Image (cartoon, rainbow, N blue to C red):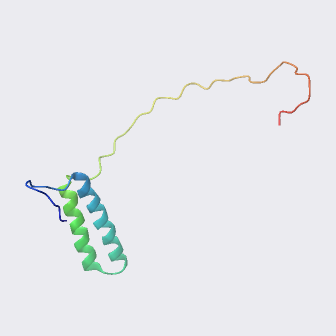
């Protein structure tokens, strides 16, 4: 990756490293699917290097999460008992 800088050193950001890691990994999968194993391994190694540069240590560990009990079921009588005069055009 070539980065232009004037008078100060520059580095890729963490997000840029993660982007390149994702792209190299995907490209490696494509090459592996086309039976170009050596090229795929080189690309996957580049992806690992970018992941390490980004500080990636793997996905977070799974944790048990608790949810509150839902509220008690409420029974509602939603039927009208009033007589309405006129045509029934509810539909």
- Residue 57 x %, y %: 22, 52
- Give the number of marks: 0
For the point 13% across and 55% down, which residue is it? Answer: 10
Relative to the observer, which residue lies in front, 45 or 9? 9
Relative to the observer, which residue lies in front, 39 or 13? 13
- Residue 46 x %, y %: 21, 67
Residue most extreme to the bottom? 35
Quarter occupied by the C terminus: top right
Q: Is residue 61 above or below residue 32?
A: above
Q: Is residue 50 above or below residue 59?
A: below
Residue 49, quarter of picture:
bottom left
Is residue 45 at all visible to an observer of this figure?
yes
On the picture, is 65 further left or further right than 73?
left
For the point 70% across and 23% down, which residue is it? Answer: 76
Quarter occupied by the N terminus: bottom left
On the picture, is 75 further left or further right than 66?
right
Residue most extreme to the left? 7
Is residue 57 at all visible to an observer of this figure?
no
For the point 9% across and 55% down, which residue is it? Answer: 9
On the picture, is 91 further left or further right than 41?
right
Residue 3, quarter of picture:
bottom left
- Residue 82 x %, y %: 84, 18
- Residue 41 x %, y %: 25, 73
Relative to the observer, which residue lies in front, 91 or 55? 91
Residue most extreme to the right? 86
Residue most extreme to the front? 6
Residue 47, quarter of picture:
bottom left
For the point 61% across and 26% down, which residue is it? Answer: 73
């Amino acid at each position: 990756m070539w980065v232009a800088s004037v008078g100060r050193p520059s580095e890729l950001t963490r997000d840029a490293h993660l982007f390149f890691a994702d792209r190299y990994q995907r490209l490696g999968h494509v090459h592996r699917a086309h039976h170009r194993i050596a090229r795929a391994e080189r690309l996957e190694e580049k992806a690992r290097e970018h992941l390490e540069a980004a500080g990636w240590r793997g996905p977070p560990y799974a944790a048990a999460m608790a949810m509150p009990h839902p509220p008690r079921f409420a029974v509602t009588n939603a039927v009208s008992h009033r007589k309405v005069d006129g045509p029934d055009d509810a539909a």
